[in-house]
Amino acid sequence: MTDLFSPLTLARGPAMKNRFMLAPMTNQQSHADGRLSDSEFNWLTKRATGGFGLVMTCASHVQAVGQGFSGQLGIFGDQHLEGLARLASEIKARGSLSAVQLHHAGYRALPDLVGTPVCPSADEKTGARALGLDEVEQLRDDFIAAAKRAERAGFDGVEVHGAHGYVIAQFLSPEVNRREDRYGGSLENRARLLFEIIDGIRAECRADFQVGVRLSPERFGQRLGDIRDISAQLLREEKIDYLDMSLWDVTKEPQEEAFKGTSLLKHFTDLPRGNVRLGAAGKIMSGPAAAAVIDAGCDFVSVGRAAILRHDFPERVRRDPNYDSPALPVTAEHLLDEGLDHTFIAYMSSWPGFVAEAQTQ
């Protein structure tokens, strides 16, 4: 367990005290206008108490039209600053680094909440309309403004959400992005928005402000080769501090036939990374599973479901290297004890086999 519990220095800003990052997770606990609720505050700060080296918020939308779920934490206006500052201060007081994940749902936004969603190109299935060139530039600027807002609130950094089929991933996908301007066509053009956001954050925020990027190489029209090439560029240029790969399952093989024969994770751990740290998420539910990700070549692990089940997952692994998460399903009472409120538990009840049915009535 030495590697999991050794400090992890980052190119900028303070070090993580260990290799456990709380994955950004939808929880639907905040207020309808995006302001932080006490429930979301308690959920996140409890994970800082539980020993995570870095605590990250849920995906926090940078434009009102980018809202992807009800009860989503917002960072698109100064009205959100008070709650964000309270959160950043308390996470720091409990010994963890803090980060906001910057998000825009694109065509995955909810029409009931946002009206007509927006997308790189018109999407008939969802009814999303195509962004104009000026709107793409505004989207870029709003990601940058949100990072500046996180800095003002006292966070150590931000993670740019480029995964899971949300707006940046939509730009990266040749299936979704059919634009014919400088933001469409070639991979360089499709990735332009992501790299301009990173450049803008670096220009606008302080020198020691930490910047991460989350990518996923499969589903939602992503091509593994494209995501690997983008990852290689992010690592090579060293403008970010960490790359957080969401792999669905850290032990799986790629879906694409041309890349089978080795783990999906290995396609990224093999890339030269210089001073950029690499982590992965995907069904890391035990001490041995976390250690295996480090042994496979990652610098940190990004933990989601195991952190829902136990707020102190890192501390439990420190005490017992063979620790495993509770068997599913768990009761609503168990989740209440772990700092989830009833709204979050209702959301988790939509995950098959996660919450015991008798306890959700």
Image (cartoon, rainbow, N blue to C red):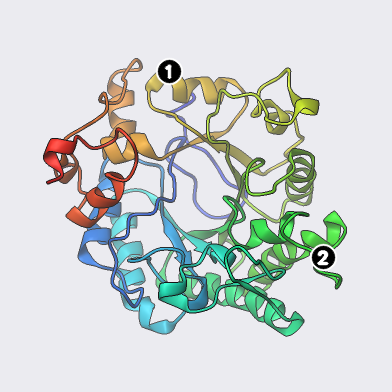
| Residue to which mark 2 is pinned | 184
Task: State the mark number for residue 288.
Answer: 1
Q: Position of residue 113 (x, y in %)?
A: 41, 74
Task: State the mark number for residue 81.
Answer: none
Residue at x 81%, y 68% (from the top left corner): 179
Q: Earlier in the sequence, mark 2 or mark 1?
A: 2
110 relative position to 227: left or right: left
- The answer, for residue 113, to whether it is visible in the render is yes
Q: Label 2 to label 1, Cα distance in Å?
A: 42 Å
309 relative position to 58: left or right: left
Residue at x 66%, y 81% (from the top left corner): 138
Pointer 1: residues within 10 angstroms few (<14), some, or many (20+)? some
The amino acid at mark 2 is Gly
Q: Position of residue 139 (x, y in %)?
A: 63, 76
Proximity of marks 2 and 1: CB atoms separated by less than 8 Å:
no
Q: Quadrant of residue 52?
A: top left
How many marks on residues? 2
Q: Is residue 15 above or below residue 191?
A: above
Residue at x 55%, y 28% (from the top left corner): 250
Quarter in which the N terminus is drawn: top left
283 relative position to 207: left or right: left
Between 322 and 166, the one nearer to me in the picture:
166
Q: Position of residue 347 (x, y in %)?
A: 29, 51
Q: Quadrant of residue 42?
A: bottom left
Mark 2 element type: loop
Q: Position of residue 178 (x, y in %)?
A: 79, 64
Pointer 2: residues within 10 angstroms few (<14), some, or many (20+)? many
The amino acid at mark 1 is Pro
